[in-house]
Image (cartoon, helix red, strand yellow):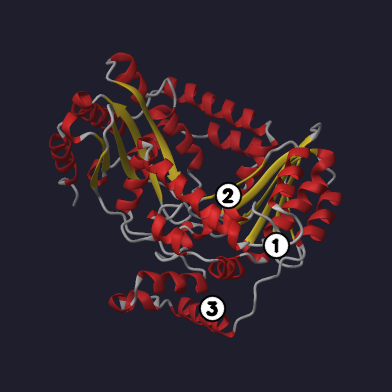
Amino acid sequence: MFHRYRLDNGIEIISEPMENRRTVSIGAFVKVGSSHETREENGICHLIEHMLFKGTHKHTAKEIADITVRMGDDVNAFTSKECTALYGMTITENLPEMIALLGDMLSGTKMDAKELAKEKRVVMDEIDMYADSPEDLVHELLQKRVWREDALGFLISGTKTTVRSFDKEQLLAFQKQNYYGENMLISVAGGYEEKEMLACLAKSFGRIRPKPFSPQLAAQALKAEKKSELALEPYFAVYPEERSQNNKLHSERATGTITAPEYFCSFVTEHKDIEQLHMNLAFPGLVLGDERRFMYSIFNSVFGGSNNSRLFQRIREEEGLAYSVYSYSSAYQKAGLFHIDITVQPGLAEQVLRETIEIIREFTEHGLTPEELTMHKQQVKTELIMNAESPKTRMDSNAKFALADARLYTLEEKLERIEAVTCEEIRQLAKECLNLSCCSICVVGNRENGNWNALRRIWKELTAQAV
């Protein structure tokens, strides 16, 4: 059973003690990611995340590395589109030291100019690494295109141009603006004494300042509240031609009302001198925290998320057309996508795409059988139970849905929700998430080795059905 607390400075805490565990996982999440950046800021969250490990006013970068090794060398961080996270896992007796280290890294970042210059080079190497990976590139290009100018489509790492432009003062100013109590959440799961854990958090994270008072922000928030009461349209919607994307984002930050981006059906290609062709299809999907997420898990498992799925069995096992074919979800707080990823020999791409479309049509029209439903319910429930054994998985899951203001469920409640799903519910969800007239496609590969025009013609045939 999990419990929720709040420190005096506004930091929310989600605690899930687990009996008979000698390990504990903790994560500190800041509610800012690439989707909160302006175009000129793109990549700043990711660079700050890197700099968290480059020294504080209390510890050098080498000392931070030495401390993490003593605790098991399992301290890491990530930046996503919607948050920045610093997390670790260790044995129970090391939890106070882990908490002290994470608190120091988040509140005492030194931002040394020499370390920043070195870390910029590291980040630019990381940007090149992702650009060299067709599996990553096909996904990122498609999200960038379907969300056009919205920050949700930005690359998390930013661009080399933006990364080069950042200086110490910019990073410190951005961190000061966003790294405050009410904008943070701490999730803990595993074996520990809760009272002692809370005392350690209050000591190490209590020095993080609460949300700074600003007359301008207070006035903007009050104005937004009044508009909501009167059911008026937001200002930027009334005068869109006078609002840049950056100004819109600043307004959303101030009022706390982040609007969903518009989805654009797209066909995008990128030439890379590689042997295989990487193709990714995307459809508008569920947002993070949607109450149908348990139904969604079964739907994905049946359609393309398991070795027994329709996609895998037809395209790989029966037809032998592709080595890798699977589906997955990208769910965010204000939008979501349902993806199908295919890696195929260029000469077979058109056939595989037509087969995939046929599978979609069959599934959305006829749904799944009761036998399939029973089988995939068992698969999803087994995965949930296995994940529940891991403190790290439970810590991460609790944080993910709490950040989205979604309801947190116990394992027993999750299993009940899975068991209640029906075949017709899955079919209706499939019709919503696999609407071929809303299909977007990204193709990455060697243009000389395949007929990309044929793929584009198929896409145009599909999207021409849109009303």
- What residue type is disc 2 on? Phe
Q: Is residue 18 left or right of residue 374?
A: right
Q: Which residue is more in the foreground, 189 or 270?
A: 270
> Which numbered disc, 2 or 1, marks the residue that appears first in the sequence?
1
User: Which residue position is annotated with label 3?
Assistant: 221
- What residue type is disc 1 on? Ser
Label 1 secondary element: helix
User: Distance of mark 3 from mark 2, alpha carbons?
Assistant: 25 Å
Which residue is found at the position 67% from the left and 61% from the top? 109
Q: Is residue 63 left or right of residue 314?
A: right
For residue 99, above or below residue 346: below
User: Which residue position is annotated with label 1?
Assistant: 107
Q: Position of residue 449 (x, y in %)?
A: 18, 29
For residue 106, above or below residue 22: below
Which residue is found at the position 47% from the left and 45% from the top? 126
Q: Position of residue 93 (x, y in %)?
A: 85, 40
User: Which residue position is annotated with label 2?
Assistant: 401
Q: Which residue is more in the foreground, 421 or 141?
A: 141
Label 1: few (<14), some (14–19) or many (≥20) C-alpha neighbours in 10 Å: many
> Which numbered disc, 1 or 3, marks the residue that appears first in the sequence?
1
Which residue is found at the position 73% from the left and 56% from the top? 103
Q: Which residue is more in the foreground, 104 or 332?
A: 104
For residue 425, above or below residue 2: above
For residue 160, above or below residue 445: below
Front tag of 2 and 1: 1
Label 3: few (<14), some (14–19) or many (≥20) C-alpha neighbours in 10 Å: some
Q: Position of residue 19 (x, y in %)?
A: 80, 34
User: Distance of mark 1 from mark 3, alpha carbons?
Assistant: 27 Å
Label 3 secondary element: helix
Q: Is residue 90 left or right of residue 346?
A: right
